[in-house]
Amino acid sequence: MTTIILEVDNRTVTTHFILLGFPTRTAFQRLFFSIFLATYLLTLLENLLIILAIHSDGQLHKPMYLFLSHLSFLEMWYVTVISPKMLVDFLSHDKSISFNGCMSQLYFFVTFVCTEYILLAIMAFDRYVAICNPLRYPVIMTNQLCGTLAGACWFCGLMTAMIKMVFIAQLHYCGTPQINHYFCDISPLLNVSCEDASQAELVDFFLALMVIAIPLCVVAASYAAILATILRIPSARGRQKALSTCASHLTVVILFYSTTLFTYARPKLMYAYNSNKVVSVLYTVIVPLLNPIIYCLRNHEVKAALRKTIHCRGSGPQGNGAFSS
């Protein structure tokens, strides 16, 4: 498709971008389509089952699982922002995306990434309170506080994305912009801008530093305190039980933080290489697929609730209840 160009104030305004994606032979394109379609549908199914299990099982109406249900809901939309367009491009010769479509995809992608960073940090704080202050846990992690923290995650994600978009969407793009990626991400867009993008880069760097560094510090401090507390537990069984309550979350944190930090540590330089797309696949496709599996394998309560949901969903809804701390 020929990129449509408009003339505004003697400047050409691009109304479409071209996503280069994964340029391979047709046979490989179809193979990739089948693999990524199966992965996308399985990710949706896994996270939907976790949400249903938490909602229907009264034993899971606790802060830890409230945050987990938010994580599952977030990742359903997280993969939906990227996967459908990527799947269409595997089967189509027209890999264009409209300017508004590109900016919308970028806005929601940034929203969900920032929200997940903060949500994982709050989940680490929840595990810190549960292990280091077990007697005060019901008093500290009340329904009101949990709801406020969950809402704050979404608000911060939305506001961070909005501020970034104010600077990125007003950049001037000219010619036929070809984005060397399979979705609209910040650095590829900055790379194809034909005007000075230093201000947008500075804002992006500052906000990324805030959204990544602060949650990372919270996670590190929480798990340092958790480890110190666990080492003071006299019995091996007690230490193992304490570790099991945070093993799933720690695994998810390591997977998500390591892949995204590798990608965004030096985004301007790294996006010049096609190999960076492979790393992006890890946190946009593979990690959302693995997260529900990790929680199921490491958490006996979630596994039991999932079995109950799968076996009993057809016979009617389970008893509901309010989340309690």
Image (spheres, helix red, strand yellow):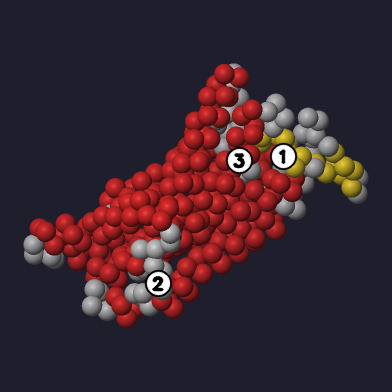
Pointer 3 residue: 84
Image coordinates of residue 78 in percent, x first then y, are 54, 50
Q: Nearer the viewer, residue 226 or 316?
A: 316
Q: Position of residue 298 (x, y in %)?
A: 27, 51
Quadrant that contains the C terminus: bottom left
In the displayed structure image, the side of residue 119 where residue 245 appears, left or right: left
Q: Which quadrant of the structure image shows residue 165?
A: bottom right
- Front: mark 1 or 2: 2
Residue 132 picture location, percent across and down: 24, 70
Disc ID at residue 217: none
Which quadrant, please, contains the N terminus? top right
Mark 2 is on which residue type?
A: Gly
Query: Taking 251 as reference, is 48 left or right?
Result: right
Which residue is depicted at the point 71% across and 46% down? 101
Q: Secondary structure at mark 3?
A: helix
Q: Secondary structure at mark 1?
A: strand
Q: Residues within 10 Å of mark 3 (few under 14, many from 20)?
A: few
Most extreme residue toward the bottom, as rendered? 139
> Which residue occupies the foreground of this view, 258 or 126?
126
Task: Name the residue rendered at 27%, 69% in the picture.
Answer: 130
Q: Nearer the viewer, residue 147 or 12?
A: 147
User: Label 3 sits on what residue type?
Assistant: Pro
> Which amino acid type corresponds to the residue marked 1 in the rendered image?
Ile
* Label number found at residue 97: 1
The residue that label 2 is drawn on is 321
Cα distance between the residues tagged 3 and 2? 35 Å
Q: Taking 193 as reference, is 36 left or right?
A: left
How far, Cα to Cα, is label 3 from label 1? 12 Å
